[in-house]
Image (cartoon, rainbow, N blue to C red):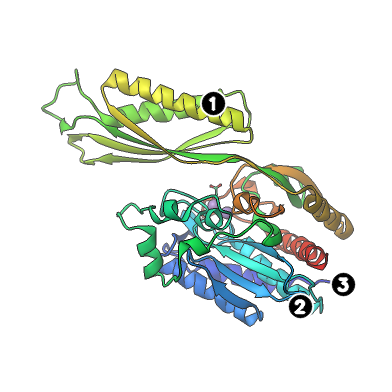
């Protein structure tokens, strides 16, 4: 079988999808169920139809595009990623795994390959946590990690529930119908940009992920006492922002000194009220992202941040409440699938190395229901979640080729 990746078409489609954005180019912002996200979904579904794939959507808006195999009752091979994008993002995160999968399928079809198992592309809802604070909502539900009840109770910042968003987006059915049994799929393979600098530094074309780091999200609500910025003297102030600022520094300190080189902590959201220059902040809301490849050190760091936050707030007489929004374990990729990807690279004479993913992906939750693997391609300077995110057409073509060959093997056995 000789596969030819049509990189000009794939790059054109990546560029076209990037223009479907809430922000002017080169910035890509496509928050879940925004007008741009809905238009982007229509664009991808059109490509799937043109590729001859059968479309289906579940109650949480996950999109499934299927190429029926000759033994259609066998568990299908799945691939896919996401097309939602955080504010001020670039055009490759998630998109390479969706549009790359469509091109991989087109290449397989052009080569007259006939799959034994069906091959199903999944475009997951809300991999990014922007709308609801929680990432990977579609794959969490599908993998049975998030209960339909908990999902239904999720609210966006404006107080609108997930159920309302789904209804408005035209999604139908009950969330209870989303989870899949173990081995509903025979395997899941996701193509993604690395979002780190290691492949580029090592001048290696493909990263084969063996493990995905354990992410967690901590929400902290601080309540102090507001007042006039001129009339209230400094002694005895109970400024919620200053407590939050100390907590953000504690996050940095804990992540840098946890003893694990892979520990990372970020206070990515810090909102204050009332938000007037001449008013002492009476409330602060912090959202903290803490990850590690080592579950024990991640959990210890999380507990330490909470302890330090309590101490800071006791000293500053600030009321504090916590919510651990997600505390996920790491995922391990399937040894046999990892070996298959390595064989594909070797046969194609494409350089590869095994690695850990520090970013999370829908694969983290697909691992709950089937064997998984991830194919990483380099991105310039390791930059991601920024408009200057970039992978070259050559790198994308290689990743797509490796994905196509891997899907072909997985769909044949
Ligand atoms: C995914 O976007 C992540 O934050 O790792
Ligand atoms: Mn992302
Ligand atoms: Mn992603």
Q: Earlier in the sequence, mark 3 or mark 2?
A: 3
Q: Residue at 66%, 79% (x, y): give it.
A: 51
Taking 161 as reference, is 381 above or below it? above
Q: In which quadrant of the rendered view does residue 240 lie?
A: top left
Residue 408 visible (yes or no): yes
Residue 208: image x %, image y %? 75, 49
Q: Earlier in the sequence, mark 1 or mark 2?
A: 2
Q: Are marks 3 and 2 in contact (CB under 8 Å)?
A: no
Q: Residue at 36%, 29% (x, y): give it.
A: 245
The disc label shown at residue 90, or none: none
Residue 94: image x %, image y %? 59, 58
Residue placed most toward the observer, 252 or 331 = 331
Residue placed most toward the observer, 82 or 194 = 82
Q: Nearer the viewer, mark 1 or mark 3?
A: 1
Q: Quadrant of the N terminus?
A: bottom right
Q: Earlier in the sequence, mark 1 or mark 3?
A: 3
Taking 139 as reference, is 248 above or below it? above
Left or right, residue 374 beside residue 322: right
Taking 367 as reference, is 399 above or below it? below
Residue 355: image x %, image y %? 73, 43
The disc label shown at residue 1, or none: 3
* Residue for badge 2: 109
Residue 289: image x %, image y %? 48, 39
Looking at the rendered structure, the secondary structure element under dot 3 is loop
Looking at the rendered structure, the secondary structure element under dot 1 is helix
Characterize the local packing of mark 1: few (<14), some (14-19) or many (20 or more) Cα atoms within 10 angstroms.
few
């Amino acid at each position: 079988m000789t596969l030819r990746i049509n990189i000009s078409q794939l790059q054109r489609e990546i560029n076209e999808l990037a223009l479907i954005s809430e922000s002017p180019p080169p910035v890509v912002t496509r928050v879940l169920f925004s007008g741009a996200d809905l238009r982007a979904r229509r664009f991808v579904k059109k490509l799937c139809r043109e590729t001859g794939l059968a479309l289906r959507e579940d109650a949480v808006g996950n999109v499934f595009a299927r190429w029926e195999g000759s033994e259609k009752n066998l568990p299908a091979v799945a691939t896919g990623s996401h097309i939602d994008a955080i504010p001020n993002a670039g055009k490759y995160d998630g998109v390479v795994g969706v549009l790359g999968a469509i091109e991989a399928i087109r290449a397989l079809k052009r080569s007259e390959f006939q799959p034994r198992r069906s091959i199903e592309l999944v475009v997951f809802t809300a991999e990014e946590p922007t709308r609801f604070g929680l990432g990977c909502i579609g794959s969490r539900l599908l993998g049975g990690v998030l209960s339909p009840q908990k999902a239904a109770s999720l609210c966006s910042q404006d107080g609108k529930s997930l159920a309302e968003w789904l209804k408005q987006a035209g999604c139908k059915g009950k969330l209870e119908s989303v989870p899949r049994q173990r081995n509903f799929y025979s395997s899941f393979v996701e193509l993604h940009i690395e979002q780190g600098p290691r492949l580029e530094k090592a001048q290696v074309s493909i990263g084969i992920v063996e493990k995905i780091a354990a992410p967690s999200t901590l929400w902290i609500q601080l309540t102090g006492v507001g007042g006039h910025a001129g009339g209230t003297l400094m002694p005895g102030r109970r400024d919620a922002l200053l407590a939050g600022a100390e907590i953000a520094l504690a996050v940095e300190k804990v992540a840098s000194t946890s003893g694990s080189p892979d520990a990372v902590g970020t206070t990515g959201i810090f909102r204050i009220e009332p938000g007037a220059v001449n008013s002492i902040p009476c409330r602060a809301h912090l959202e903290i992202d803490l990850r590690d490849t080592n579950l024990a050190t991640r959990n210890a760091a999380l507990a330490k941040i909470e302890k330090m936050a309590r101490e800071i707030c006791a000293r500053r007489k600030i009321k504090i409440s916590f919510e651990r929004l997600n505390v996920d374990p790491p995922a391990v990729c399937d040894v046999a699938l990892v070996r298959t990807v390595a064989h594909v690279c070797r046969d194609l004479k494409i350089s590869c190395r095994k690695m850990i993913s520090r970013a999370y992906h829908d694969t983290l939750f697909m691992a709950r229901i089937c064997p998984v693997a991830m194919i990483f391609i380099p991105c310039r300077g390791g930059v991601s979640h920024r408009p200057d995110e970039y992978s070259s057409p050559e790198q994308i073509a290689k990743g797509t080729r490796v994905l196509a060959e891997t899907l072909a093997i997985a769909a044949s056995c």
